[in-house]
Amino acid sequence: MSFWRKVIGSLGDRRPSNAEVSRDASRWAFVDVEVGLKDKRIHDIGILRWDDAKFHSGRKKEAKEFLDGVDFICGHNVVHHDVKYLFGDEHIRWGLVDTLYMSPLLFPERPYHHLLKDDKLMSDQVNNPLNDCEKAYDLLLDEMEAWKRLPRELTLIYATLLHDVPEFSGFLDMADAECCEKEELPGHIYTFFHGRICQNVDLRSHRRRQVAYNPVACPHGVANGARSHGCHFAIVIFDEGSSGQFGRTRYNGSSDHKWSA
């Protein structure tokens, strides 16, 4: 069974995202770039493409040509490593699917995943970029399966917070993740964390309060603190008092800590 057929099967009948998807999620490639520790130059490149074609060479120009027709570039730390060395300051037209950042989000227990050690892929062969591509392939399949198992309310929260964040946007695009309107987000947070959020905080009030989210810290906080989707969700509530000054209260999400406003 092809990779994308497995992905489609893992997603089931997810509703379409609010954003228009212009890329073809079946045209993907996994990329791994080996760079010298001292000279910071590319020594080897591995690419595994959707049509089972493989590229293994240190020639950057040929690697770029091999990616013609690809819509999603996938990999482990692909956003801040592989693409950086392969394309430099060139315009990136591809969706970037990074398994590194999704792993702690979807596998909050440590170790995050059996294919990872200290956030790095456990490779069977040292310095073999094609082998690392295959490991990233397996990891992404597991991440898609884990995404399917999340409660819908939580996927709405994650997708709405992270759909514009480069480290996460490609995955969410490929998964066709559903976002909600930003004004609906406090309601979803209140519903999902009901009973664990400070009862004095009114997340639905828009007249006197603003809800500020750190989009990267929030979801990782939720994942890392929870065995069952639950803790350390960093919400900051700004409350405009009569003096016109803004105070704030925070909720760390854990079941045994409720910070009052």
Image (tube, rainbow, N blue to C red):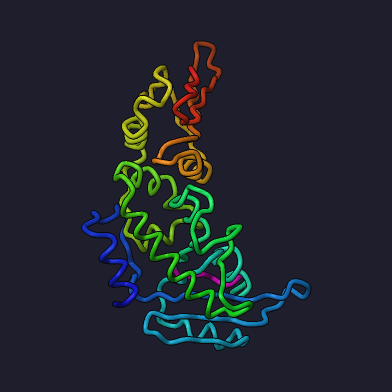
Judge whether 207 appears above or below 94 on screen: above
For residue 253: magenta?
no
Please tell me which residue lies in front, 116 or 35: 116
Residue 53 to residue 18: above or below = below
Residue at (45%, 52%) from the top-left corner? 107
Tell me: 109 left or right of 118. left
| In-front residue for pair 10/75 | 10
The part of the image, by quadrant, that contains residue 52 is bottom left
- Which quadrant would the N terminus be assigned to in this image? bottom left
Residue shown at 50% from the left, 80% from the top: 47
Q: Which residues are magenta?
A: 89-94
**Dominant SS type (magenta):** loop
Position of 151 with respect to 235 (left or right) is: left
Above or below 63: residue 152: above
Q: Position of residue 3 (x, y in %)?
A: 34, 74
Asked if residue 31 lies left or right of residue 227, the reply is right
Residue 109: percent from left, percent from top: 49, 48
Residue occupying the point 37% across, 31% down:
193
Residue located at (63% from left, 78% from top): 127
